Image (cartoon, rainbow, N blue to C red):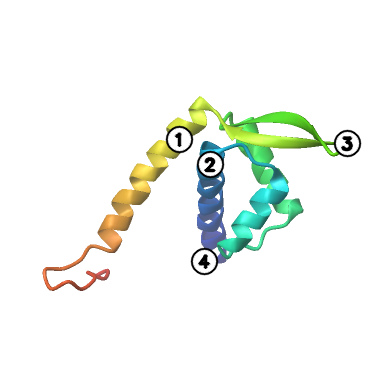
Amino acid sequence: MQRLKQKLYLGFLHMHILYHANKEPFYGVWMMEELKEHGYQIGPSHIYPLLNSLEEEGLLSVEHKLVDGHTRKYYQITNEGQLVLNDLMEKVKELSNELFETTEHGGINHAK
């Protein structure tokens, strides 16, 4: 059960990262702080492998920028990443509508 939960959690992390990469380029520390605001507890030893895997899959690209004398990697979504994100968003929307569908009486139609 724990392994399945971790896989689902990882999927949400990937989607969250792609969502923000689609809005604007970001760097790793910013993403850790953003995820923390949403209840995710993720540190450098987890975020950078996630970002690297999304880059290796061709979903993110990286641009190196010099900031205060240090090189910082900025991640942004690729065309392939946008296609994947759009597909995932449709699936989430469909599932969300089904999960939280309101009944004729205005209540939520919980799983049967």
Mark closer to the chain start, 2 or 3: 2
Query: What label sits on residue 84 in the rendered view?
Result: 1
Q: Residues within 10 Å of mark 1 (few under 14, many from 20)?
A: some
Query: What label sits on residue 20 in the rendered view?
Result: none
Q: Nearer the viewer, mark 4 or mark 3?
A: 3
Residue 40, compared with residue 84, is above or below; it is: below
Which image quadrant for residue 74?
Answer: top right
Query: What label sits on residue 69 in the rendered view?
Result: 3
Q: How many circles with numbers are drawn on the protein?
A: 4
Q: Are marks 4 and 2 in contact (CB under 8 Å)?
A: no
Q: What residue sits right under mark 2 in the picture?
A: 18
**Where residue 60 sits: x, y (%)?**
60, 33
Residue drawn 17% across the image and 71% down it? 106
Q: Helix, strand, or loop for circle 4?
A: loop
Mark closer to the chain start, 1 or 4: 4
Residue drawn 85% across the image and 39% down it? 68
Real-space CA distance between mark 4 and mark 3, rounded to the nearest whole angstrom: 46 Å
Real-space CA distance between mark 4 and mark 2, rounded to the nearest whole angstrom: 26 Å
Q: Nearer the viewer, mark 1 or mark 4?
A: 1
Residue 42, compared with residue 90, is above or below; it is: below
Q: Helix, strand, or loop for circle 1?
A: helix
